[in-house]
Amino acid sequence: MTKTNVLFVCLHNSARSQMAEAFLNKLAGDKFFAESAGLEAGTINPYVVQVMQEVGIDISQNKTDSVFEFFKQGRLYAYVIAVCDAASAERCPIFPGVCNRLNWSFPNPAEFKGTDEEILAETRKVRDMIKTEIEKFIVTY
């Protein structure tokens, strides 16, 4: 069975897109092949690493990638899903072939302020929102 290629994009590939990629590969890796990239490569958010470990997913060794590098390599995706705000999503290149573009806007964990526990609590909320959206995507597509 051929897997459906999905690319998750956000600003720095440091949080939201990493979580979405990990959830789709874990929950439906038999049906989908997910990758993630950023408009600008960044550094994995340590709060995101921690909250994903809490649900049994280790992304601590992931690296960040540039969406423009994937584009230049001619990679093809059935879905390109932006998980950042709409203005940032508009900067994403148009990939060749049959490609469905979706935009799921989630708060950016890099912008959370407060104590470590407050930031973790907000990051958990985003993680859970992303997981819910991935679960809906799996049954819809």
Image (cartoon, rainbow, N blue to C red):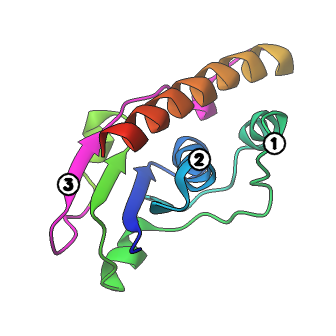
Distance from the alpha carbon under mark 1 to that under mark 2: 12 Å
- Label 2: few (<14), some (14–19) or many (≥20) C-alpha neighbours in 10 Å: some
Residue at (39, 60) in percent of width and height: 6
Amino acid type at circle 3 is Asn
Residue under circle 1?
56
Q: Is residue 121 left or right of residue 100?
A: right
| Cα distance between the residues tagged 3 and 1 | 30 Å
Q: Is residue 69 visible?
A: yes
Residue under label 3, please give it.
Answer: 100
Give the magenta range.
Answer: 93-114
Residue shown at 26% from the left, 38% from the top: 87
In the depicted view, which residue is nearer to us: 66 or 20? 20
Residue 90 in view of the camera = no
Mark 1 / mark 2, whichever is N-terminal: 2
Which secondary structure type mostly characterizes the magenta part of the structure?
loop
Q: How far from the left and from the top, in percent, is residue 100?
A: 20, 54
Task: Give whichever of discs 3 and 1 has the lower sequence position.
Answer: 1
- Residue type (three-letter) at the residue carrying disc 2: Leu
Disc 2 is placed on an element classified as helix
On screen, 116 above or below 16? above
In this figure, which residue is indicated by the disc labeled 2?
27
